[in-house]
Image: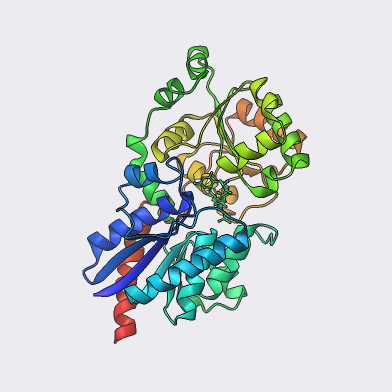
Amino acid sequence: MYQLICIVGARPNFMKIAPVIEAIKNETKCIDVKLVHTGQHYDESMKHQFFEQLGIPEPDIDLEVGSGSHAAQTAEIMKRFEPVMDDLSADAVLVVGDVNSTIACALVAVKKGVPVIHVEAGLRSNDRGMPEEINRVLTDQISDLLYTTERSAENNLVREGIAAERVRFVGNVMIDTLKKHLTRATPANDTLNSIPGGDKLIAENQGFALLTMHRPSNVDEEETLKPLLETIALASKQIPIVFPVHPRTASKIKEFGLSGLISNANIITTGPMGYMELLGLMSSAKLVLTDSGGIQEETTALGVPCITLRENTERPITVEQGTNTIVGANSQLIFDTVQEVLSTGGKQGRQPELWDGQAAVRIARDLEQWFKGRNA
Ligand code: UD1
């Protein structure tokens, strides 16, 4: 058996690893998976309900690193992952996405001479001020096998000197998860009924917009967060907004004394949500406002208009073929785009190539051949 260590750490990793582990179990005969959770995200709302809802096996090992500065968190993951690698004698380490856990574990593996496999490789915002961009570039440079979600990713990788034969365009594992669970998603009204103010929103029956926002570039500085929230408060006059608040954002709203901006507007807030609840809300929303990478892709797969509160995207296919519009932090543009989407229904979009629910199956089959090829 080939020993494969799969890594998860933060919330968006869970949706990506679930179909990969399942496909390896169903499609291959000679790969044994060990799951390591770094503990980057640790709260019940940020971790446990995802494992349950997505049927991810309990991690074999939890490194329990918790939060910290980028350096402290990355270093702690590396320190704690190294002895685990020694114990497990892995043949390869598989990482997903672009969070600190991704680069930390990839770096430990490559320094031990163990090949790294990166799922969701090659995405580039070309914005080095974004922590995830650094994680993407570095992880790809030290990966042996790189699975991509859209064709533009391979061009990015080749431009950075990565050999094309190591790159495989397989589609989007996060969309595998979405397609698998969509029919079982929690109905939006059930979720709204459980949020204070949600019953009023259902009774008014005019639909709602969904907002998520957690990027450091949007929430960490008062000069950015305050005008953004003011604009969103203004937009909520056009359509009620449902806002599940990420812990990072919640602590900044409190620190800067901005809660009044939200409570005085047509916005209802709640804590971070489980996957099934968010999927149900997303699929019923008239539009989604977000700075998340994953939600740009999920809205494209759902055909729901997405307004992205960032200056750029590493996922250009969601703009070129999907339902995504990039507006940055420009108040007028945000307001006008909300108005336009509400009056026109927004971009129709179409399903990007290979976002068909089978990406993880393609990965599992390819991975088995890759392991066999290395042994031959
Ligand atoms: C991380 C990822 C980001 C991803 C996001 C999804 C990096 C660099 N960033 O950002 O790419 O989009 O996850 O959520 O890896 N906290 C809790 N409970 C938790 C986890 C965090 O309260 O379970 C709070 C802590 O105050 C912590 C803060 O959230 O300091 C930020 O957490 P962290 O994991 O450092 O970064 P995220 O902003 O979540």
Q: Report the side of 279 relative to 338 (left or right).
A: left
Which one is nearer the viewer's eye here, 115 or 154?
A: 115
| Residue at the image position 30 percent from the left and 67 percent from the top | 365
Task: Identify the residue at image location x=61%, y=27%.
Answer: 342
Q: Looking at the rendering, in which quadrant would you find the C terminus?
A: bottom left
How many numbered marks, from 0 up? Answer: 0
Residue 325 visible within the image: yes
Task: Give percent across and percent down for residue 186.
Answer: 37, 31
Vertical relation: 235 (above or below) 142:
above
Residue 337 pos. (x, y %): 68, 34
Q: Residue at x 52, y 63 (%)?
A: 151
Side of 126 relative to 42 (left or right): right
Question: Who's the residue at 50% across and 37% down the image?
Answer: 272
| Snapshot colouring | rainbow
Residue 150 position, x and y percent, is 50, 59
Image vertical order of residue 231 relative to residue 178, above or below: above
Residue located farthest toward the bottom when viewing the structure as drawn:
376
Residue 329: name its quadrant.
Answer: top right
Choose between 144 and 170: the one closer to the eye: 144
**Location of residue 44 (image quadrant):** top left
Q: Position of residue 212 (x, y in %)?
A: 57, 38
Could you say which is closer to the camera, residue 116 or residue 67?
A: 67
Q: Quarter of the image containing the N terminus? A: bottom left
- Residue 117 visible in the displayed image: no
